[in-house]
Amino acid sequence: MGRSRYTIYEPTHPHFVTCTILNWLPIFTRQESTKIIFDSLNYLNKNDNLKIYAYVILENHLHMIVQSDDLSKTMKHFKRHTARQILNLLKEQNIHTILDQFKFYKRAHKSKTTYQVWQEGFQPILMQNDKMIIDTIKYIHHNPVKRGYVAEDTHWLYSSARDYNGVGGKVEIERFW
């Protein structure tokens, strides 16, 4: 898991994870950038046994409850792939202000790369029981409402709240209830 201070003791159990864009830059404000996340999650779901119980993507971070055969490895692949795709998108669209910030805020020990997209780690929290999972799913889904982006959680397109309310979402999830 790299330099993270978090340790995964149950790598095959569901965990609440948070992935944050470096310096909280607002990357996920366009459909093209969120599509990168959705495509990657769908790929990992089919090819890496990633189970997604809930998710929300906000402008500069995402929350998920996920499980895989080796969560550290899966998250490493997810962040590496999405970082490359996000950088390619920014280069294609000539968005140099954000690229320059990814270069400026990059950690000093990342000497082999020019840019850093994600903050290090993903803060895994083991979901220890059903109540904890349910409460965390509700927290995840309520995030856009709490921020004032939408009035109801099902109105947020980048969330599994729609799946839990019978409306198809953008990622295949394992519904918990």
Image: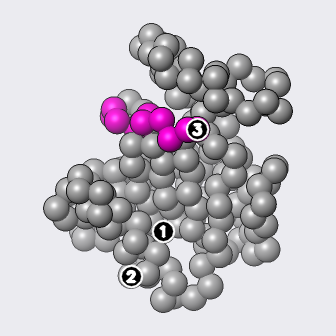
Q: Residues within 10 Å of mark 1 (few under 14, many from 20)?
A: many
Magenta stretch: helix, strand or loop mostly: loop
- The residue identified by callout 3 is 22
Q: Quadrant of residue 28?
A: top left
Q: Quadrant of residue 94?
A: top left
- The residue sitting at 24% across, 68% down in the picture is 166
Task: Please name whichever residue, 54 or 4, is drawn nearer the observer in this view of the structure.
Answer: 4
Whichever of labels 1 and 2 marks the residue nearer the N terminus, that label is: 1
Mark 2 and mark 3: span between their CA atoms? 34 Å
Mark 1 and mark 3: span between their CA atoms? 25 Å
Whichever of labels 1 and 3 marks the residue nearer the N terminus, that label is: 3
Amino acid at pointer 2: Trp
- Residue 156: assigned label: none
- The residue sitting at 38% across, 82% down in the picture is 177
Left or right of 138 on screen, residue 19: right
- The image shows residue 47, relative to residue 35, as above or below, that is below
- Residue 53: assigned label: 1
Task: Please name whichever residue, 69 or 107, is drawn nearer the observer in this view of the structure.
Answer: 107
Amino acid at pointer 3: Leu
Q: Secondary structure at mark 2?
A: loop
Q: Are marks 1 and 2 in contact (CB under 8 Å)?
A: no
Q: Are marks 2 and 3 in contact (CB under 8 Å)?
A: no
- The residue identified by callout 2 is 177
Residue 107 rendering spot, x and y as whole percentages: 73, 33
Would residue 164 be counted in the magenta stretch?
no
- The residue sitting at 79% across, 30% down in the picture is 108
Task: Please name whichever residue, 18 or 32, is drawn nearer the observer in this view of the structure.
Answer: 18
- Quarter holding the N terminus? bottom right
- The image shows residue 159, relative to residue 114, as above or below, that is below
User: What stretch of residues is rendered in magenta?
Assistant: 22-31
